[in-house]
Each structure stands twice: as C-alpha cells, then as structure tokens.
Image (cartoon, rainbow, N blue to C red):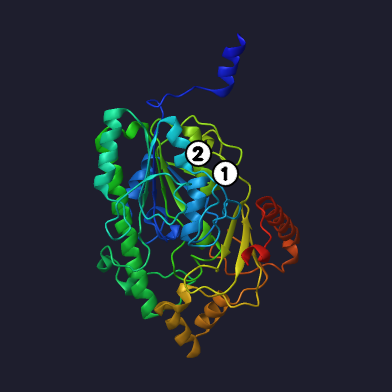
Amino acid sequence: MKPYLFLLCLIGPILTAADRPNLLLIIADDCTYRDLGVYGGQAKTPHLDQLAAEGMKLNRCFQAAPMCSPTRHCLYTGIYPVKSGAYPNHTFAHDWVKSIASYAQPAGYTTHLYGKTHINPKSVFPFEYSKLNGDNNPDPAEFSRVLKGSEETGKPFVFIAASNEPHEPYTKGDAAAYPPESLELPPVLVDTPETRSAFSKYLAEITYFDSQVGELVGLLDQSGLQDNTLVIVLSEQGNSFPFAKWTCYDAGLQSGCLVRWPGQVKPGTVSEALVEYVDVVPTFLEAAGLERPAILDGRSFVPVLKGETTRHKTHVFGLQTTRGINGGSEYFGIRSVRGERYRYVRNFTPEAVFQNAATADPVFLSWQKVAEAGDEVAKRLVREYQHRPAEELYDCETDPWNRHNVIEDPALAAVREELRQRLDAWMTQQGDEGQATEM
C-alpha cells in the first residue's frame, strides 16, 4: 500500500460539503425528563414517542449545570462551564472558546440558532440568529427557509431550535387536559392546591413543546432532507419546582435525549450509556467527518448511536452556583459526580441558606404555610431544600429522586472515597478552586 493511501485509510473518508449530514438540535427549557410521556411521565408526547420509535432513546444523558446559561454554553462549545468561563448564570464564555458554529462554517455549513439564546459573546457563537417573535420561541417558517436554501444550494446546515417551553410562566398548551386533582405528584413536591395547579400547567407546556418538535421534524420530513439529517432532541435541565433546576440531584442534571439518524441509528433502540451535553459537539463533528479539537472536554458518542458499543463514560459531572441567579443566595456553590449507580454531592457552604427564584414562588410559599401548620412532609422538604449538609451520597437506583442521604453508610465508604477523588480530579483539571472560584 502506498503511504498516502495508508494515511487516507487511517483518517477515514473525507466528506465534501454535499456529503456531510445536516445537524438539527431541538432543546426544551426547564423540563424534567421524567415528566415526558416518552420517558414514562404524565405529559403526553406523541411526537417524541414517534421520534424514539424512529431512532434511539438514551436513558442516561446529563448536563453539567442545572440552569439555562451554563447548560447552553456547555452544549454548544463542548467545554465544561468553569473552564469556558460560563459557570454563573447570565454570563459569557472566554474569548478563546469556540462553538459548533465556529467549527462547522469552514466545512461549508450554514449555522443557525433560532429561539432562546442566553449565550455570550456573539464572537464565540457566530450563528445566524432569528428575529424573535416575543416569546423566545423558534419560528417554523424560518426553519422552512433554511431547508429550502439547503436544498437549492446543496450546503448542509446546523440548525438549533431552542424552545422557551416549558419555562415559566406556564401560559401555553391545554391545561384542561391535565386536571390538577388527577395528577400524581413526584415525591419531592408537597401536595398543595398551588403545587397541583402549577404542575398541571407545566405538563400542558411540555405537550406544547412536543407539538413544536412535531412541527419542526414534520417540515424536515416534507423537505426530502430527512435521510441525511441527524436529529437530537434534549429536555434541558429539570423544571423550576424545588429539587430539580438549580440543584445537582438527578432531577436537576439528567436530561431526555432522543436521536434519529436514518441509516446510522437503528429504529426503536434504547441506550443506557452515560453521555453528557458536553459530548454533543464532538458527536456532531464526528458525524460531519470533522476533527475533534483537543481543547474539547467532551467525546463523541457516535459509536453508541451506531450500536458499536453500549458504554461511553464511567462518570458524569455537574456544578451549580447561586451567584448571578434570580433571587439567589449570595453564595452557595455545589459540585457533583455520578457513576453508574451513585451520585456524590459536595456543598461548599452548608452554613448558608439555599435560595433562588423557586423559594419566592407561590408554590414554595404554600409549602412553608402548611409546614408551619404542622405538616410533617412539608416540614422535611422545606428544610432539606434550603439546608444542605457538606456532603451527600445517593443510590440512584433505589432512590432516583436523591432524598435518602447515605453518606455515613459504612458499607459505602469505598464508593464515597472514590467519588470524592474523582470530583477532586475533575475540579483540578477544570481549574475549579471551589469556594474561591465561586467568589
């Protein structure tokens, strides 16, 4: 074999712009994955159900931060939040950071981010942005325009449709389809009329998001480009009820993830591989035949999608800071690591009271009211939400809502120590100095 032919065999096929797959990413906003019908939840999601039937449902996908801005910076750059600089909310990445738009454009892609943004600076994220219609939602007509342009020019596209649903306020969808009195509340919610009313409206907005997915994927399928388009749908971090968003529990950091890629992903498959949002950019790059920059923290899970392996990572990581969030404590930093079964959580300042927008919401205020009236469940949940120990350890198999702290269990001493060390190593690698970084 001639040397140059051997080199081509090593690096794999070189794709032209016309051969590269289109990349469609649809992301919800403040949606706990367990509430999606496709994941066994109460919210009806017929379009997501259909997408899962046509592709792969990943059951263990995680993001690095349980709030909007750090999640999106990480998702679009492939770099964890502290290293990129975008770990508080309402913040920005360092100017040396690059995003999927930066990598895809030189390869001939048009790159579009329509809907909610929450990322900065634009130099790091050189997308074409939509003209928002007042509610931060992507306009399907704009996606139609991109599809038509791609068909006419042969240029592939990266299209990110960032929905604003089911983020509060809950004003979309048909709440009548979810009568409050008929709902089964998660065990981390106190049963009050305010909770039931809000949860009903929240489920309605999930179904509204599902209709957005159906409209966008329907336009793709009508265009004739579906066979060469990799579609990923994500549910983002957990909802804004207590114990989800703004926390490093599974309900805050775990995400729904559905992938359809005709000819590459076998329909109706399910994966238990541990994957992270930080892996999406490397996955897109490999799918497009592009090189993965060494600076990226994520790794492509294309082998998982193609059924070549059932495993991807052994551990996933998360962080949260209340600095810069609406109604947040002056400081309350959290870091976490999760393996196949156990989640370890470290709270830097357990002496501080944990607070955010949720603790000023009528739902939480109703919890406090019934707690003061003597309700023992409400007392426990209010206390546990606002007052955290320095360390927490949860068995995510037997305790999926992470409410039974087993940090002191002597039988789990080895698990505790291993996760402590893995978290320390990750923080060191990321340049995360803990409380000093928080401040």
Label 1 with label 2: CB-CB less than 8 Å: yes
Total numbered labels: 2
Q: Which residue is mark 2?
A: 283
Residue count near mark 2 (Cα–Cα under 10 Å), binned few <14, some 14–19, many ≥20: many
Q: Which residue is mark 1?
A: 298
How far from the left and from the top, in percent, is residue 351? 65, 78
What amino acid type should be assigned to the residue bearing mark 1?
Gly
Instruction: Identify which residue is drawn at 40% across, 54% down.
Output: 117
How far from the left and from the top, in percent, is residue 319? 59, 60
- In 3D space, how far apart are the residues under numbered discs 1 and 2 (Cα atoms)? 9 Å
Front-most of 144 and 406? 144
How far from the left and from the top, in percent, is residue 259? 42, 42
Front-most of 194 and 287? 287
Give residue 19's quadrant in the image.
top left
SS at mark 2 in the image: helix
Give residue 249's quadrant in the image.
bottom right
431 lies above or below 363: above
Front-most of 45 and 11? 11
88 lies above or below 357: above
What amino acid type should be assigned to the residue bearing mark 2?
Thr
In terms of sequence position, does the residue under pointer 1 or pointer 2 come before the other? 2
